Image (spheres, rainbow, N blue to C red):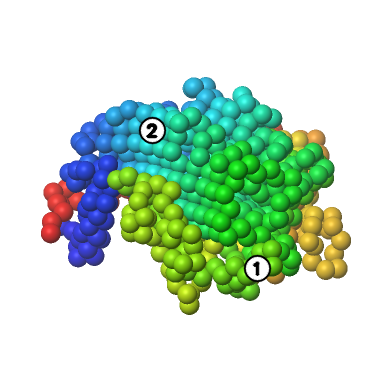
Amino acid sequence: MLNSVMRKRVQTLCSVATLFALLFVHHPLLAQSMHNAATEAQLRAAIDASAPGDIVNLTSDIVVLAEIVIDSQLRIQGNGHRITVPVPAFDDSGLPNLDASLHRVFQIREHGDVHLDRLEIRGGNALATDGFGGAILVNFGKLRLSQSTISHSRSEGEGGALDNNQGEVYISDSRILRNAAGLLGFRGGGLVIRFGILHLDRVTVAENRTEAVDSNGGGVAVEGNSQVFINNSTFANNVTRQLGGGLWSDVPVFIANSTFTGNVSGGFPGGGAVHSSGNLINSLAAFNYFLANPSVAVGNDLHAPGGARYHMTLSRPFTAAIFENVDWYDRLYLQAPETDPRAVFTGSRSARMRDNQGFETGDARVEQPLLVDVRGALLVTPNPDSVLFKRDYIYQGAPVNLSGTAAGYHEAPTPVFGYIRVPEADGPDGWIGLIGSAAEAEAARVTIDQIGNPRPIGEDAFYVRGATNEAVSGYYQLRIPRSAGGRFVGGSIFGDSHAVGTPVNLTALPDDGQRFAGWACVEDCPSPLPPGTILSLANPFGLDMPAHHLTLSPVFEAADPGEFTVTYVGNRSTGGNVPASVRGSSTVLIAPAGDLVREGYRFAGWSTRPNGIAGTAFAPGQSHAGPGNLHLYAQWIHPTAAAVFADGFECSD
């Protein structure tokens, strides 16, 4: 028997499942059965047993040892759990794992019609397979990804996170984060679309990169006769060594209500944000760069090879960008003091470029507005006094009133993409229906921003350009650059933004033959401490985020002959204290968990890998006598014996 609380929970989930089935026209059948899965074997069996419209319900994190191929219609409900490979392409800090697993997570084939919801897909490496789609290959199939994240994946060819090969991909309320396309000269550090369809709605594409010198599209690359529609989305801090730091396309794309900041291109003429004969409506492209050489970065936002439309789009004044046959309507530039990113956004941070191994290179620095986690979305946000809240801009001596502007976007059953100014007399044609009729564009008017805030439209209201009008303050960035002699857990080479006072725990992981010698302040040190000052010898080291940016680095030094270190990592723990690292030269006993906990899980010992399948297990009290350092990650097991849905329970009205 289900108790009343569980029954209400089941009924709620049934209602949600029914709602999704009704909304998504390419999932025409209502869910017929629910299949729970807590292991890879159960996941594969559930997929094989699913009839069209069934739901596979994850009850735990899952590690897959080989690619999962789907050629049917189903939905995988992730419930916030993670699917990963034994060793992701990149570790949590963003550094490459040299012994990464050589397979992706999913391939969706021609008859596959898959909805992935509330799922984190971490890792994947399309190297030993066909080199396309580090985490997911959509091979003529259909994929809907909602409330999910694809991260820490890599492709030796195209599409570090996902490759859409002649399929249909719809992504909403999700993140494509910290992926890379490899060294074979292909494209799309995050996503690549080849002769397919892509819709991004309320999506953040951030900190992805291409690694080859002649590759395009740090965030997204579009090839062939593809159709791409982007609405209410953020492209930030993506890097390519050729064209289109945020997005590169050889066909027109359609972009509305979106923000492009901190993206970097490396090949002339650049397109730090966007290199495309595309359409940008009510969007913001500012503080993007062309890296002329390792020592010189030049502001460079948009490059249009021809035939582009930029309507109500803000950028910095042109520098080295080249525009051919661009239709500007209400052409807007950020002007001083708006050319200071701190006058526009929550904050910004100067950053240097990195090589493929994560080491900082060259002297060139770019100013990247902060990415802030707001209500589960990763955004570049305006500060409360931002110039983005101005109603009037002056362009060539004439005032331009920005009130009453709108964009229309609708994805199904046929795309609609339009633009309007209210009242109609203020614009040449009222609605400009780029795709669809004026009436369809009016009906598709976008009324919310990336996180659901209303976008007011009218003479007395202001319509914010870009992805969000959510104004926040009090955030600063903690960055941990890579240093020789070891790695670390708890921060990232990209830098993570935290509200003042947020507790952060850092753990240094020395390589064999090295030992940890302290956490050194590298930049923005607390006054009056000079750079290089050791702030703490603790490992792990806990600190509360100060009211300023901070760059710390673990210092490593040569260990004494025969000396080794045992270091512990909480590995997604949610409370308690991680055991302190221990140096030894004889026998060291492995520590118990103590008060360390992870909510909803039970402690199951330690392993030399975060995903214990790929590592060596150690139990508390077991001995280690070297040689070599030992890094131990807490292992957590979800109590999956309690099924989410009881046998025999059916959804009812």
Q: Quadrant of residue 354?
A: top right
| Proximity of marks 1 and 2: CB atoms separated by less than 8 Å | no
Q: Residues within 10 Å of mark 1 (few under 14, many from 20)?
A: few
- Residue 487 point in image, percent of width and height: 68, 43
The one nearer the camera, 614 or 209, is 209
- Residue 524 picture quarter: bottom right
Q: Quadrant of the C terminus?
A: bottom left
- What type is the residue that disc 1 sits on? Ala
Q: For mark 2, what is the residue?
A: 167
Q: Which residue is mark 1?
A: 398
Picture disc at residue 40: none
Query: Does residue 354 appear to the left or right of 281 in the view shown?
Result: right
Q: Secondary structure at mark 1?
A: strand
What percent of the width, then of the height, locates residue 194? 47, 30
Query: In front: 318, or 471?
Result: 318
**Image height check: is 548 above or below 354?**
below
Q: Is residue 558 above or below residue 528?
A: above
Residue visible at 56% across and 56% down? Answer: 329
151 versus 338 height, above or below: above
